[in-house]
Image (cartoon, grey):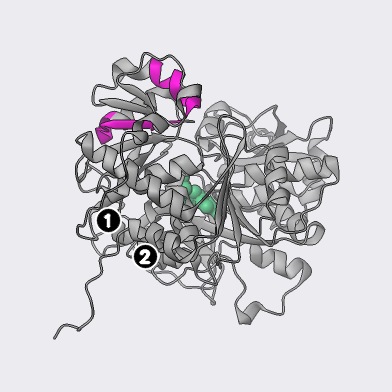
Amino acid sequence: MLGLMQDWPLLCHRIIDHAAIYHPERRIISRSVEGPIHTTTYPDVRARALKVAQRLDRDGVRLGDRVATLAWNTWRHLEAWYGILGVGAVYHTVNPRLFPDQIAWIINHAEDRVVITDLTFVPLLEKLADKLPSIERTIVLTDAAHMPATTLRNAVAYEDWIAETDGDFAWRQFDENTAAGMCYTSGTTGNPKGVLYSHRSNVLHAMMAALPDSKALSCRDVCLPVVPMFHANGWTLAFSAPMVGATLVLPGAKMDGASIYELLNTYKVTFTAAVPTVWLMLLQDLEKTGGRLPYLKRVVIGGSACPRAMTKVFQEVYGVEVIHAWGMTEMSPLGSLCTIKPDYAGLAGKAKLDLQQKQGHPPFGVEMKITDDSGRVLPWDGKTFGRLKVRGPAVARSYYKVEDDPVFEPDSFFDTGDVATIDRYGYMQVTDRSKDVIKSGGEWISSIDLENLAIGHPKVAEAAVIGVRHPKWDERPLLVVVLKSGQTATREELLAFMAGKVAKWWMPDDVVFVEEIPHTATGKIQKMALRERFRDYVLPTAVAAAE
Ligand code: AMP
C-alpha cells in the first residue's frame, strides 16, 4: 500500500522560491569581482535566475545539458546556478586552480556546451579555446562597462545576456532524480572523476547540512561561505543558506586574511566555513593587527584535518566555536561534523580539544563503517584503524562515464580511500588517506596526528609527515616543516617538543626544513609530490640500522 501524501519532487530551484517568498528581507552581500560591494535579496536573485533559465532555454540549452561555471562566490554565480537548475541543465563547477590542461580535460569530458566565467578567468579560457570544441558560447559575469575585448566564441556580458529576457518563465518540471550538478574530484593520480549530483540528493543534503548537529543554520545567521562554490559542491551552502533564509555574505575573489576579516566584522557574520589554509591566513592577520571577532559564533573547518592549535586559538582567544567537519566531493560533500554529544558535554580545556581533533559523527543520511582489507567490519573502539566506507542518499553510486569503479562496492558502500577510527559514541577520526598511511614494522602510523602535533609548535607554519624507506621497518616517518617567517629552529627542538605526546615508535626519525610545501588545487598537501622529492632520502636511523 502506498502512502497518500503529495508528490512534491525535491527540485533545487524550489529552495530559491522558498527563500524569495518567506525570507525576502534577507540580503545577499557580495564583494564583486570588479571591486565594490553589491547587495541584493532572495526575490531579486530568484527573478534574475528566472531570466538565466529563460535565456538558456532560448539559446537551446536543454534538460541534461552541462553548463560550466568558472567563478568565485558572488550573487551572479548564485543566480547562474539556480537558472541552470531551473531549466533542467547541469551546473558544472570547474576549479580554476587546476592546471589548464586538466581544466580542458574536464570540460571536454563533461561536454559542456556553455561556459559562464568570471572576468578573472577570461585570459585562461582564451588560451584554452582551441582545446574546447564543445563550448558554443561564453558568458562573462559582468556588465557591458567592464566587458573586455575577447576572442572567446560568442562571448557576451552576463548583464546584457539576461537583459534580453523579461523573466516571464516557469521553472521546468521533471523527476527529482534528474542530474543537477557536477563536480570533478581532484584525484592525485589518474584523470579527475566526475561526480553527478541529482536534485533530490542536493535538496536532501542541504537539509542534512543545516541540522542543529551539522551547521545549525537558521534565518538568524549571517553566513559567509569562504569555501568556493567550485570546491566539493560549495559545501552545499548555496542550498542550505537560502533554504533556511540565512543572510549570505559572499567573498568574491578575495580570500586573504584582511579581506575576510573586513567582511566578518562589517556584516556581523555569525557563521563561516573554509579549509584550514584560509583560517591560517585570517589568524595570522589577526595576530598582526590585534583584531577581534565579536560577532562570529561558529566556524566549520574541513577539507583537511583542522590543526589542534587552530581550534584552540579560535575558541580560547576569539571565543568562536570550531566545528571540525569531514567530507568528500563524492558525498555532496558532508560526511561528519564534530559537535558535542551529551556523553562528552563535560569536557573542557585539553580534553575538549582532543575530542575536536576527531572529524565527528554523521548526520542522518550518512552510514559509516570501517573494515580491514578483506572487508571485515572492525570495532568502534576509537583505536582500531580501518578503511572508511560510507553510503547514503547523497553519496555517489558511480562516477560520470566510468563503469564499475571498484570504490563503489556491491553492498552500495563507497570506499572513501580514507583510513579512520570510530569510537564507541560514533565519532570518526581520519588518520590518513590510505595511500599516505605510514607502515612501520607492520603497524600503521597516522601522519595526520603527527602533523597536528608539529603544527602546535609556535615556530611552525605548516607541517607534513611522509613515510620514507627504512631497511629495518619498511617505512619510518619524516617530518617536513615550513617555519613561520623570520623564525629559526632545529631538528632537536621540534623533536623535543613532540616527545612524550605520541607513542615513542611514532616519533619522526628526522626533520627537514623547506621553504614551501606543495598543495593541490583544493588546498590539500600533495603528499605524492613530497614522497617523490624525498624518495632517496636517507634517514639517520636507516644508516644506523645498516651499520
Ligand atoms: P575533496 O573531495 O576534495 O573534498 O577531498 C576529500 C578528502 O579530503 C577526504 O577523503 C579526506 O581525505 C580529506 N578530508 C576532508 N576533510 C577532512 C578532515 N576534516 N580531516 C582530514 N581529512 C579531510
- Residue 121 on the magenta segment: yes
Looking at this view, name the residue that lies furthest to the bottom: 1
Point out residue 412 in the picture as x, y percentages from the top left corner: 27, 63
Where does the image place residue 158, in percent across and percent down from the top left? 40, 32
The picture quadrant where one finds residue 116 is top left
Decide if residue 281 is on the left or right side of residue 290: left
Please state which of residues 394 and 544 is positioned toward the viewer in this rendering.
394
User: Is residue 328 among what the camera can see?
Assistant: no
- Disc 1 marks which residue? 397
The structure residue drawn at horizontal position 37% and vertical position 52%, both measured from the top left corner, is 330
Q: Residue at x 38, y 29 (%)?
A: 160
Identify the image quadrant of the N terminus: bottom left
Q: Is residue 175 visible?
A: yes
On the image, numbered disc 2 is attached to which residue? 204
Look at the numbered disc 2 and give the secondary structure of its residue. helix
Q: Mark 1: few, some, or many residues within 10 Å (few <14, many ≥20)?
A: many
**Tag 2: amino acid:** Leu
Q: Disc 1 residue type?
A: Arg
Position of residue 386 measured from the top left corner of the image (x, y, whole percent): 45, 61
Between circles 1 and 2, the one closer to the viewer is 2
Say which mark, if any, is on residue 136.
Answer: none
Ligand 1 closer than 8 Å to label 2 CB? no
Q: Is residue 165 magenta?
A: no
Quarter that holds the C terminus: top right
Distance (Cα) linking label 1 and label 2: 16 Å
**Dot 2 alpha-carbon crowd within 10 angstroms: few under 14, some 14 to 19, many 20 or more:** some
Question: Over which residues does the magenta segment extend?
Answer: 108-126
Q: Looking at the image, which residue is at 50% across and 59% down?
A: 241
Describe residue 159's horizontal placement relative to residue 167 as left or right. Answer: right
Q: Is residue 486 above or below residue 246?
A: above
- Could you tell me residue 249's position as x and y percent? 59, 49
Residue shown at the point (63%, 47%) measured from the top left:
276
